[in-house]
Image (spheres, rainbow, N blue to C red):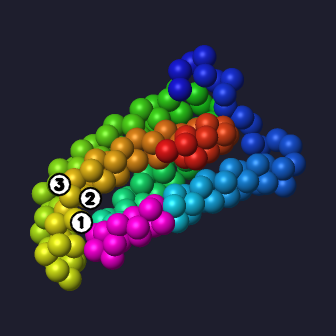
Amino acid sequence: MSKKDGAAMQDLTTGPVTRHLLKTTSFMLVIMIFQTLYFLIDLYWVGRLGTNAVAAVGIGGNLSFFVLGLTQMLGVGTTTVISHAVGRKDHPEALRVFNQSQVLSLLTAVLFLIAGMAIRIPYSVAMSADAVTAQLSGDYLLWFIPAMALQFGLVSMGAALRGSGNFKPGMIVSTRR
């Protein structure tokens, strides 16, 4: 969000509220549909590898709910504070909040990555019914934890765009993983 990006900010305080709500919710609906499709398609392909593989992905997937909670806190806060600054037409404040959000998301991602890698094996062993599933879960998490850490920056950037009234880029990025 540079000074020249001010044109990307949309004034949601004027015009029909219904149109703004439909625009906002339609992008969210598309994102939710694609996320559900990702899970179903993953389950289809992993299901072909056997029950241990499905269990391992399920165990690893539980951590995604933890990440979802953390990223939602970051995203909702970012959207709210940036939208307030944009509503006041205070571009320097919106830029400052955006930068703070990026730093916070980076710090949270690094902390999650370190903690996730540290608990990867003990977590897999504790949550698995057998050694094979624990091994598969640990292997899966070796790749999945860094991918989840990347979500923090993406969510923060998407939240900043939503806060400025620009919904489309976040939807496009969320549907093209």
Q: Give the residue at x 22% y 65%.
A: 136
- Give the CA separation, mark 1 to mark 3: 12 Å
Along the viewing direction, whichever of 59 and 112 lies nearer the viewer: 59
Task: From the viewer's perspective, tell me whether residue 62 is left or right of residue 77.
Answer: left
Along the viewing direction, whichever of 176 and 71 lies nearer the viewer: 176
Q: Disc 1 or disc 3, which is closer to the eye?
A: 1
Q: Which of the two discs, 3 and 2, labels the residue nearer the N terminus?
A: 3
Q: Residues within 10 Å of mark 2 (few under 14, many from 20)?
A: some
Mark 1 residue element? helix
- The residue pinned by badge 2 equals 140
Q: Disc 3 or disc 2, which is closer to the eye?
A: 2
Boundaries of the magenta span: 42-56
Choose top left, top right, bottom left or bottom right for residue 163: top right
Q: Is residue 88 magenta?
A: no
Q: Are marks 3 and 2 in contact (CB under 8 Å)?
A: no
Q: Give the residue at x 42% y 32%.
A: 99
Q: Is residue 50 magenta?
A: yes
Res 33 seen here: yes
Res 162 seen here: no
Q: Are marks 1 and 3 in contact (CB under 8 Å)?
A: no
Task: From the viewer's perspective, tell me whether residue 116 is left or right of residue 44.
Answer: left
Amino acid type at image mark 2: Tyr
Percent position of residue 104, x then y:
34, 43
- The residue pinned by badge 3 equals 117
Percent position of residue 69, x then y:
41, 63
Along the viewing direction, whichever of 49 and 105 lies nearer the viewer: 49
Q: Residues within 10 Å of mark 3 (few under 14, many from 20)?
A: some
- Give the CA separation, mark 1 to mark 2: 5 Å
Q: Residues within 10 Å of mark 1 (few under 14, many from 20)?
A: many
Percent position of residue 52, x then y:
28, 74
- The residue pinned by badge 1 equals 137
